Image (tube, rainbow, N blue to C red):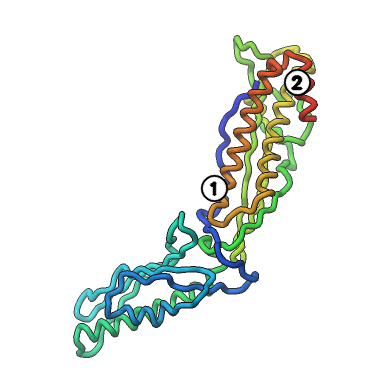
Amino acid sequence: MFTTIWAKNTHKKHLIAGAFYFIFSLLAVGQIPTFRFQSIGGTPAHSLPYFQKYIGKQASTADFDLQMQVKEFEFKSKDLFQFHADIFVVRDTISGPQLLYSYKSQFKTQGYKSKAEHGEEMAKLSSQSLSERFNAWWKNNWDRDPKLIQEVRVDFLPDYLPQKAEEDTLFYGQKTLDWGDFKSKSYPGSRFAAQIFSNFEYHAFPKIEKGILYLPIQVKVYMLRSHSWKKENLPDRALEHELTHFKITHQAAQQFKDQIKRMKLRPLWYDSELQWWFLDAYRWMNNTQKTYDTETGHGIHPVEQEKWNDKFR
């Protein structure tokens, strides 16, 4: 008998929140990518030429498309001007523009000029200041910001095995399963002879370098002694039945790894894709465990039991 208990998604704390699909040509490693502004919104008509001059220099092609939205462009008093603009990166049509950089500044007006003249002066100062700050930010952050990831490179580490034995957890491949690993008390009145709790999970340890997300992944396949039980004086074939449950769990973990190896994770969706294929393998495991118990009669049909043992030698 196999009981499924959902494993806590401990891998999430390791994963960087968000990454975005790179739909342009991949760059040589270490090369600073180019960008262009698709649109500049929210600017007063008189200031737009300055932003187009200093910010919106258009190129026929670029590695990243950006959008700028002016949030604030106003005089707070006769001699104090306030400016706020957000810059978004556009990676695909599904996720839409993603906030990349936010800039706020204040300027004091000088001299006796008309409001229109001061407005033009502030437009020039704001656009120049934003351009300088954003260019510096881009130079220092293009290779580390998760919104600008260009590629995902997965490396599967060997399945986890502890250096020292743990009291409650037996990891697959650590040692041969025996009845001593079933430490929980049997359920009174249960018609089953034994029950193993086995499970698998994965942990990812992402690191961004030069716009590439390196993603080492390690899988853990294990059984919990404190959740596994047996009745007294059971034959070896009963242990074989529980061992095959453990092997099915291990096979599900291998299918998860094989699927990820066959595909190329997209920067925008890599976390979701990992979750999807993990759940797909988990569903396969649960369905296979149920089919296994049904066909073998929970281990009481020796011919069918041997067939399943052969599948997972």
Task: Give coordinates of residue 203: x percent, y percent.
Answer: 62, 46
Q: Is residue 304 visible?
A: yes
Which residue in the rendered view is the most extreme toward the top? 189
Which residue matches tag 1? 272
Kindly identify which numbered label has been placed on residue 43: none
Q: Could you tell which of marks 1 and 2 lies nearer the N-terminus? A: 2
Q: Looking at the picture, does residue 164 appear above or below residue 62?
A: above
Task: Give coordinates of residue 34: x percent, y percent.
Answer: 53, 74
Measuring 31% from the left and 67% from the top, which residue is drawn there? 71
Instruction: Determine which quarter of the picture holds residue 119.
Output: bottom left
Amino acid type for the residue under numbered disc 1: Ser
Instruction: Determine which quarter of the picture holds residue 160.
Output: top right
Nearer to me, 157 or 290:
290
Which quadrant, please, contains the C terminus?
A: top right
Which quadrant, please, contains the N terminus?
A: top right
Q: Looking at the picture, does residue 5 appear above or below residue 74?
A: above
Q: Is residue 199 rendered to the left or right of residue 17?
A: right
Measuring 44% from the left and 60% from the top, which residue is drawn there? 98
Q: Nearer the viewer, mark 1 or mark 2?
A: 1
Element type at mark 1: helix
Task: Give coordinates of residue 217: x percent, y percent.
Answer: 66, 49
Task: Give coordinates of residue 129: x percent, y percent.
Answer: 39, 80
Amino acid type for the residue under numbered disc 2: Leu
Nearer to me, 143 or 267:
267
Q: Looking at the picture, does residue 278 appear above or below residue 155?
A: above
Q: Is residue 69 rendered to the left or right of residue 175?
A: left
Element type at mark 2: helix
Which residue matches tag 2? 239
Q: Are marks 1 and 2 in contact (CB under 8 Å)?
A: no
Give the CA distance from mark 1 to mark 2.
Answer: 37 Å
